[in-house]
Image (cartoon, rainbow, N blue to C red):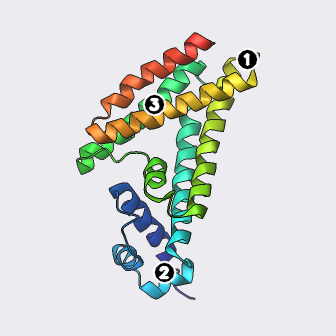
Amino acid sequence: MGRTSDARERLIQSGMDLLQAGGYAQAGVQEICARAGVRKGSFYHFFATKSHLGLAVVEQFHAASIALLDQALAKDLPVPERIERLFLMVATIQETFRDEAGAVKGCPFGNLVLEMSTRDESLRLVLARVLRDTIARLESTLRSGSPAAEPARIREQAEAIFSLLEGAILVAKAENDPAIIRRMALCARQMVAASA
């Protein structure tokens, strides 16, 4: 019986680690392989290009993001508190990064958009889809709290909340201070409560 290889998973993890460290765009295939402990030939067995690895990295982060959103937006609380919980959970993640690595790492999707969106159209399109999916999940949550509200207004509010969260993560990364995200959690909660 043949040995099962985890080389593909190690390459994806290497890409995820480089993205979180802020070095995905600059890293070459050789560096990704070295970090993963995988030969270059194995890389091309699994991924035709670095861009294909990038797509797999985004999908891996997206799966983790869906799990986070499902937990944060679970229907056990009123909608404003669910939105606040999302911000607080994201703040906790960034606090853990800062405590372990000395720095707020930011949103992997936001980081990759900033690094790659003008360099790789296929990656930009996948990232746009992932961000739209997040906004749609927020929209669904908001609609559950205001079923009679105009759909366009709910959509705009979901976009505003998402923008507030991404902006808070970006500023937290610049300041290396996750407390910024915690402060915006209350703003998001108040925003949703005021429009209910």
Q: Quadrant of the C terminus?
A: top right
- Give the SS element for disc 1: loop
- Give the SS element for disc 2: helix
Q: Which mark is residue 43?
A: 2
Percent x, y of residue 19: 40, 59
Q: Is residue 92 above or below residue 65?
A: above
Three-letter amino acid code of the residue under disc 2? Phe
Mark 2, other Cα within 10 Å: few <14 / some 14–19 / many ≥20: many
First in sequence: mark 3 vs mark 1: 3
First in sequence: mark 3 vs mark 2: 2
Three-letter amino acid code of the residue under disc 1? Ala
Percent x, y of residue 72: 53, 33
Percent x, y of residue 103: 26, 46
Residue appearing at x 53%, y 17% in the figure: 191
Mark 3, other Cα within 10 Å: few <14 / some 14–19 / many ≥20: many
Residue appearing at x 37%, y 55% in the figure: 20
Q: Is residue 74 visible?
A: no
Determine the image quadrant of residue 69. Answer: top right
Percent x, y of residue 123: 56, 61
Q: CA distance from mark 2 to mark 1?
A: 50 Å
Mark 1, other Cα within 10 Å: few <14 / some 14–19 / many ≥20: some
Q: Which residue in the protein does label 3 denote?
A: 87
Three-letter amino acid code of the residue under disc 3? Phe
Q: Which residue in the protein does label 1 denote?
A: 149
Give the side of residue 109 with respect to residue 95, left or right.
Answer: right
